[in-house]
Image: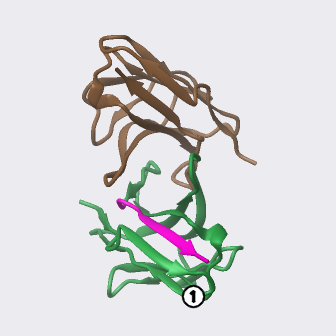
Amino acid sequence: AQSVTQLDSQVPVFEEAPVELRCNYSSSVSVYLFWYVQYPNQGLQLLLKYLSGSTLVESINGFEAEFNKSQTSFHLRKPSVHISDTAEYFCAVSESAGSQGNLIFGKGTKLSVKP
Amino acid sequence: DVKVTQSSRYLVKRTGEKVFLECVQDMDHENMFWYRQDPGLGLRLIYFSYDVKMKEKGDIPEGYSVSREKKERFSLILESASTNQTSMYLCASSWRGNTIYFGEGSWLTVV
């Protein structure tokens, strides 16, 4: 069965510092991997996704994630965070074979960026 | 842009009431989902549907039912609301295993 582990429930950082939000998954088949972001009182928005091809994927606001099959990881990174990046981040996995599109989510990591 | 609309953002209901949460998507997506979000537990799938009148149980279907009479609309029903169903409910849709798009969420408080 699939599962997703986000190792840190909360990550406090100072503005302009680098950040890494960790995500590990388990699955017996090929997977699609996603990072979603949730700002306060809002739904989830897709940040970036890995479906196939290059293992390094990027978002439009400076985040990137690298699919590492041997370590079953999909960690999210940003070299310099802004106050506006404060949000909760969810890693998710979907099986790529015969999938109805259902996602399995991690429990989320709250990123708090301080001035 | 894809739009997933949840008609009620904030609801307060009494224990034992029947509750309907409505969700509409405007992109002709085949798949629709209802998730529940609780602090420290992340998102848990309640039900999903991959076609009109089709439904599949997710991880926590107990106490809930769903209805999908039209492709664009997916309703979550709490037959007899209980206090442990106080939560944030998120509707989502996707096209054949592609990216899932979420609504803004419905905050339900059962008193």
| Residue A1 horizontal/vertical position (percent) | 23, 59
Residue placed most toward the observer, A67 or A65: A65
Q: Residue at x 51, y 32 (%)?
A: B51
Q: Residue furthest front?
A: A115
Residue placed most toward the observer, A10 or A104: A10
Q: Which residue is mark 1?
A: A17
Does residue A108 appear to the left or right of B83 in the view shown?
A: right
Shade representing chain B: brown
Q: SS class of the residue under badge 1?
A: loop
Q: In the rendered image, is residue B33 in sight?
A: no
Does the magenta portion include A107? yes
Residue range (magenta) = A106-115
- Coloration mode: by chain
Question: How many neighbours does mark 1 have within 10 angstroms: few (below 14), some (14-19), or many (20 or more)?
Answer: few
In the image, is residue A109 above or below residue A18? above
Does residue B78 appear to the left or right of B71 in the view shown?
A: left
Q: Quadrant of residue B62?
A: top left
In the image, is residue B24 above or below residue A32? above
